[in-house]
Image (cartoon, helix red, strand yellow):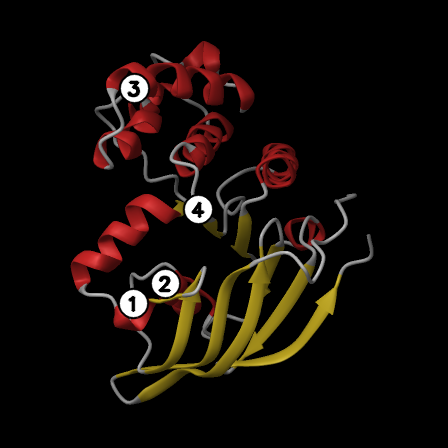
Amino acid sequence: MEHSHPPSAAAGAVVEARDVQKSYAGRPVLRGVSFTLRAGERLALVGPSGSGKTTLLNCLGGVDRPDSGSIRLHGEALETLSSDGLARLRRQRVGTIFQFFHLLPTLTAAENVEFPLQLIGTPPAERTPRVAKLLERVGVAHRAHALPSQLSGGEMQRVAIARALIHRPELILADEPTGNLDSANGENVLSLLRELGDETGIAIVLVTHSLPATRICHRVIHLRDGRIDREETNPA
């Protein structure tokens, strides 16, 4: 699967992780992870279960706090933010895509996509056209008024991608975004993520066990026992 050229070194750093360490109940999960992610770059995190992938993703999104080290989002150090500050950062500057979609079951597709805009106080007159345009872009405009229970897995993930993008975040965190889809739907969702990343310039970190998912990324970091085991750059 082809992908765009990686952003140049001159592009702005969106994420800077330096010596990130995290333990749970005395068990080290992250042992000094460092990397930089630039605008428009897609990075895959791979490794066996327990290697620290999801913990690192949670730290990047401000859901978890590292025990030590630093994570900066466009220069802002997450460790200096209060709990409220981290919640605000997640609402305004980060979008998340989950394996099991996490759509709100009582809201329609359009209402699910609109929800992040409501949280940050976007005026209703602006919300409606933005939602309609993005649902059209991800190919589910015809399902705008359907509830999640009425959607297929592929449709639900497209709605979830739209919800992650609607507030124009700087960073998308995707945790096994194709893990609950068949291979055809998975390939379609990956193509969509690649295209949207290229179109918007949003940085994407993708945790995956899927080889096709790593192929849409510019770089692949292999984690093992909480450390970066090796890093690969995909050919353009």
- In the rendered image, residue 7, in percent from the top left (x then y), is placed at 69, 53
User: Label 2's element?
Assistant: helix
Whether the residues at callouts 3 and 2 have beta carbons within 8 Å, the answer is: no
Q: Which amino acid, by three-letter code, is at mark 1?
A: Asp
| Real-space Cα separation, disc 1 to disc 3, in angstroms | 30 Å
Instruction: Using residue 109 as the reference point, say whether residue 196 is left or right of it.
Output: right
Tag 1 or tag 4, which sits nearer the N-term?
1
- Label 2 Cα neighbours within 10 Å, binned few <14 / some 14-19 / many ≥20: some
| Real-space Cα separation, disc 2 to disc 1, in angstroms | 5 Å
Q: Which residue is mark 4?
A: 99
| 90 vs 162: above or below | below
Query: Which one is in front in this view, the residue at disc 3 or the one at disc 2?
Result: 2
Q: Which residue is mark 2?
A: 58
Q: Quadrant of residue 116?
A: top left
Tag 1 or tag 2, which sits nearer the N-term?
2
Say which mark, if any, is on residue 64.
1
Q: Residue at x 24, y 66 (%)?
A: 81
Q: Which residue is mark 3?
A: 108
- Label 4 Cα neighbours within 10 Å, binned few <14 / some 14-19 / many ≥20: some
